[in-house]
Every structure is written in C-alpha cells, then in structure tokens.
Amino acid sequence: MKEDDAHMIISIVNIEPIQVAALAHLDEPKTVEHSIEAFRAWRQESGCSPVTEKRSFGVAHSNPEARVAEKFRFDICGEVDDDIPDNAYGVINSEIPAGRYARLRHKGSLETINLKVNALYRNWLPTTQESRRESPIFFEYLNVSPAVPDSELMTDIYFPLR
C-alpha cells in the first residue's frame, strides 16, 4: 500500500522545548506495548503527568525497519511541569528538542503510521527545499486507546527540519 502524497497536509512549525518524563524502550518493536503499560502505571502511581491534563508523546530514536531489533529505541513520554523523582520504573526527565518540524496528522491505527513517516522522508522531503535535522522524529498522541477505537486515533508526526 502506497501513501497517497496528494492528501498529505504538511505544515512547517516551530516548537519550544517540551519537558517530558520518558521511559526508554530498548527492545524489539513488537514488545513496545510492555513499556507503554509500564509508563501508564508510572503515570497513574506518580501523578506527575496525568494523561487527562498533560500531552503524550513517543520519540523514535531509531527506525524499526532499518535497525537490528535489539538496537531499537523508542521513548514513551508524558509532558511534565517539574523534575520527576527517582522511581522503580526507570522513568527519567528528558526534553523534546526545540526547532523546526514538518507536522503531519495521522488518523487511525498506529500499525500504519510508518507509511506516513516513510512518505514524508522518501516522497515529500526530496520535493522541497527542506533538509532533515539530526534529531529524532516524534509523535504527539492527541487521543489514546483504549479510550477511543484504533480507527479514531489521532497522532501528529513531527519530522525535524533544519
């Protein structure tokens, strides 16, 4: 299935740094759900980043299609206002870097979000005057399951630009 580039609405945005609590997933992509559940548990127990009040993010430090599975890193993040205390979950203070980003909205299951990421990189970027900045791609989850069905999930993709 090829992404329909004509229907991609991409905006260039500048963002300020975002302070987050982060849990690094350092395992195969197919096991990321275990880390997500641990992060959810930390959020509920700590009260530091309530899902109803703070934004949720994912930071892709590596491409699951291009890396050896054991080298895959994906940070599960929640916005915070203050430093978080040490905890048994391994959640740490982190920051999503400021800068220019191409932003593209994905609607639907996260199982197919890679199609839009690939379309941004392989199809859209070469047709522009833009170039990729050395910074991870990140995702902002505008709503989350199980509160909404997978078909109604809304996720903004942020692709770093120079």
Image (tube, rainbow, N blue to C red):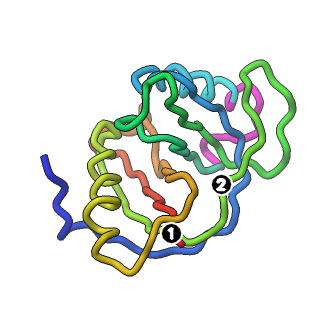
Residue 18 in picture, x, y percent from top left: 69, 57
Q: Nearer the viewer, residue 142 or 24?
A: 24
Mark 2: few, some, or many residues within 10 Å (few <14, many ≥20)? many
Q: Is residue 17 above or below residue 22?
A: below
- Left or right: residue 4 versus residue 116 is left
For numbered disc 2, what is the local secondary structure? strand
Image point (20%, 65%), residue name: 5
- Mark 2 or mark 1, whichever is nearer to me: 1
- Does residue 58 appear anywhere in the picture? no
- Left or right: residue 78 versus residue 93 is left
Q: Is residue 57 above or below residue 68?
A: below
What type of secondary structure mainly makes up the magenta span?
Answer: loop
Image point (30%, 52%), residue name: 118
* Quarter occupied by residue 75: top right
Give the residue at the far bottom of this rendering: 129
Magenta residues, start to end: 43-53
For numbered disc 1, what is the local secondary structure? strand
Residue 151 in picture, x, y percent from top left: 27, 42
Residue 51 in picture, x, y percent from top left: 61, 41
Q: Nearer the viewer, residue 131 or 46?
A: 131
Image point (37%, 60%), residue name: 105
For the residues labelled 2 and 1, the Cα–Cα distance comes to 14 Å
Amino acid, disc 2: Ile
Contact between marks 2 and 1 (CB within 8 A): the answer is no
- Image quarter (top left, top right, bottom left or bottom right) of the C terminus: bottom right
Q: Is residue 52 magenta?
A: yes
Question: Which residue position holds label 2?
Answer: 96
Q: Is residue 80 magenta?
A: no
Question: Which residue position holds label 1?
Answer: 161
